[in-house]
Amino acid sequence: MNRFVTGLAALSVCAAGAAYAQDHSAQLKARQGQFRILAINLGTLGGMAQGKIDYDAEAAQMAADSVVAVSMIHQGPLWPEGSSEMDIDGTRAKVEIWDDFDDFSSKWSALGEAALNMQAAAGTGQEALGPALGQLGGACKACHDTYRAPES
């Protein structure tokens, strides 16, 4: 009887651990949230750069500051193994992220560098937005080309 109870307890612990390990909904929501924040602020900066939105130095600076803030978030906790498009619905994160997390992290760092350049340029005039936005777009594309699955 003791072996049965011990075995049942061990099985319960393993099952609970496996269930916990597979629930990455909080991490998925957090990383999707950070990308929404980036999209909103890059949309503001892009609209100003293209003349679709009137240039406003203060609004441009706030948008750039927000991009920098998001780029400073440590990404490790948001990307647990088992949270790729192959593992869960609702994500376009390719499994290659975990095959080369150092490269993925370096691409995130490149986004941070581009964000800092945008932060320095944003309040100085509409003409400064284009080049800084190009660098940001390049950083986004470098990561998306390798680590984001196409929309289905």
Image (spheres, helix red, strand yellow):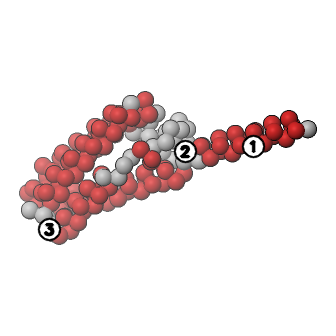
- Mark 2, Cα crowd under 10 Å, few <14 / some 14-19 / many 20+, is few
CA gap, disc 1 and disc 2: 26 Å
Give left or right: position of 83 versus 128. right
Residue at the image point whose x is 18% and y is 61% from the top: 48
Residue at the image point whose x is 43% and y is 52% from the top: 32
* Amino acid type, mark 3: Ala
Decide: marks 3, 2 in contact (CB < 8 A)? no
Q: Label 1, secondary structure: give it.
A: helix
- For the N terminus, give its image quadrant: top right
Q: Label 3, secondary structure: give it.
A: helix
Query: What residue did someone put label 2 on?
Result: 89
Farthest front residue? Answer: 2
Q: Which mark is residue 12?
A: 1
Is residue 38 shown to the viewer in this render? no
Query: What residue did someone put label 3 on?
Result: 57
Q: Label 2, secondary structure: give it.
A: loop
CA gap, disc 3 and disc 2: 40 Å
- Mark 3, Cα crowd under 10 Å, few <14 / some 14-19 / many 20+, is some
Q: Tell us which disc is closer to us: 3 or 1.
A: 1
Q: Where's residue 80, x and y in %?
A: 49, 42
